[in-house]
Image: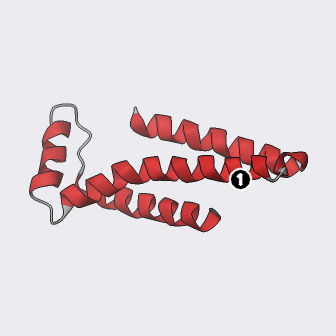
Amino acid sequence: MGSLLGLCLIVQIITGLFLAMHYVSDISSAFSSVAHICRDVNYGWLIRNFHANGASLFFICIYLHIARGLYYGSYLYMETWNIGVILLLLTMMTAFVGYV
């Protein structure tokens, strides 16, 4: 699970950087820049879909990683488990801020 999480994170960072190169955050042209990415940028629609669906896959991998830890009793290692919970909360907060 950890290697899949790392792969998902790398894909998210790379696709996010490529999308950020063409995105305009101005309120009057934000929608137009998304349409530009999907229509005019080479494989822009694919990069956008990878970025959107990669986030869902990333969280599925996180939940599977937590489920494996629960199954094998890793919650007994309190320091490691608490660091994992903090990382999960930070990831969820970052995803929310990135979505809003």
The residue lying at 40 percent from left, 36 percent from top is: 99
Q: Residue at x 50, y 52 (%)?
A: 58
Q: Image height check: is 82 above or below 80? A: above
Q: Residue at x 33, y 57 (%)?
A: 50
- Asked which colour scheme the image uses, the reply is secondary structure
Q: Quadrant of residue 78?
A: top right
Report the residue marked by disc 1: 68
Is residue 25 shown left or right of residue 97?
A: left
Which amino acid is tagged 1? Answer: Arg
Total numbered circles: 1
16 relative position to 79: left or right? left
The residue at the point 15 percent across, 66 percent down is 42
Nearest the eye: 14 or 4: 4
Residue lying farthest left? 40
Relative vertical location of residue 47 with respect to residue 33 in this rendering, above or below: below
Looking at the figure, which quarter contains the N terminus? bottom right
Residue 68 percent coordinates (x, y): 71, 53
Looking at the rendered image, the quarter that the C terminus falls into is top left
Secondary element type, mark 1? helix
